[in-house]
Amino acid sequence: MIKPDRDFRDAIVNLKGLVGADLERVNDTIMATMQSQVSLIPEMAAHLINAGGKRLRPMLTLAAAGSFNYQGDAHIVLAAAVELIHGATLLHDDVVDESILRRGAETANIIWGNKESVLVGDFLFSRSFELMVRTGSIRVLDILSHASAVIAEGEVLQLATQNNINASYDMYLDVVKAKTAELFAAAAESGALVAGADKTQQQAFRDYGLSLGIAYQLIDDALDYSGTQQALGKAVGDDFREGKMTLPIVFAIAAARDPSSRQFWQRTIGDNDQTDGDLEKAMAYIKQSEAIEKTLECARQFVDDALRALNKVPSGPIPNALRDIATFSITRGF
């Protein structure tokens, strides 16, 4: 039986303890890479990087390499590149979504502006590629550059499904795989690659990362309708206000049978015509359709896939910690 939410925090702390020395080196590499004669660049980048966050993606790179007792330095620059890619996508996301809060603080686009956020995001992408090249591995460059392209495709695909009340589960899953899970997968796969893992083990880490990334996003989408602003560091209901077709909404619309509920979803999501009280009504429909429970059940299936993938890698403290990250992610509240 899964224990309460605090155990996900414990799982994060445990994994950080196992890769903590390497993670400090990653942070130092990131800060050095963000330096520029244009003062706004390090200022804005530091605001994003220092805002907190679980650092889960770079930790996947470090953990994958550590699972094979890797003693080199390539995993450090790779993990830094992964975090810079993630940071760049966050800057771009906040502009596209017109977000005002991230991790409890004002977003960069609110503080400095949209143009500045997009351009600094581009800078972080460029720096990430410089780090990839430092590994001297064409295969690593292939994995992470492909991931960057897929993430961008996912962003565009999400725009295509936004406000589309006919968007299906499969369409939603395509967005999640591209926009979120691909970087999880690439982070884990590249760490195993530089550590000298064989192709079966590299694929196992990729499969773990992909499944974990999907489950992670599903839980995020559920929390947008069931969490709290204090825990999430952003306003609850942002997805609804932005007209995003996340899985709880997909399930709630699929369960709508009477004309009034269909008209509600068409007005609020399809036409983006929202008034006071609509979020509460949407949450009532979501509760009535058990959409949160269904979303979490889907997440559990992907967690199971992630755990099966780890059966193909060597046993040890780090793979065990990765199992805990997957298992307890279902009950996280942040």
Image: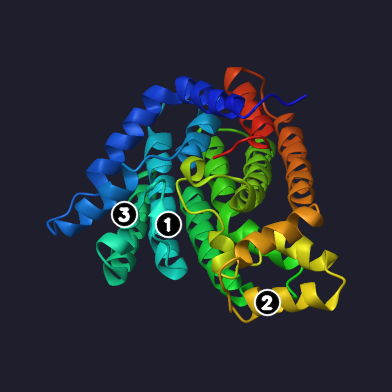
On the image, which quarter does residue 216 sit in? Answer: top right
Residue on which the image places disc 2: 164
Q: Classify residue 334 as left or right of residue 313.
A: left
Position of the N terminus by quadrant: top right
Residue on which the image places disc 3: 127
Q: Residue at point 24% right, 63% down?
A: 112
Residue on which the image places disc 1: 90
Does residue 207 appear in this view? Answer: yes
199 vs 249, nearest the viewer: 249
Amino acid residing under circle 3: Arg
Amino acid residing under circle 2: Asn
Q: Earlier in the sequence, mark 2 or mark 1?
A: 1
Q: Residue at point 62% right, 18% down?
A: 316
Regarding mark 2 in the picture, which secondary structure is present there?
Answer: loop
Q: Nearer the viewer, mark 1 or mark 3?
A: 1
Number of residues whose C-alpha sits closer than 10 Å to that of mark 3, classed few (under 14), some (14–19) or many (20 or more): some
Q: Residue at point 59% right, 70% down?
A: 243
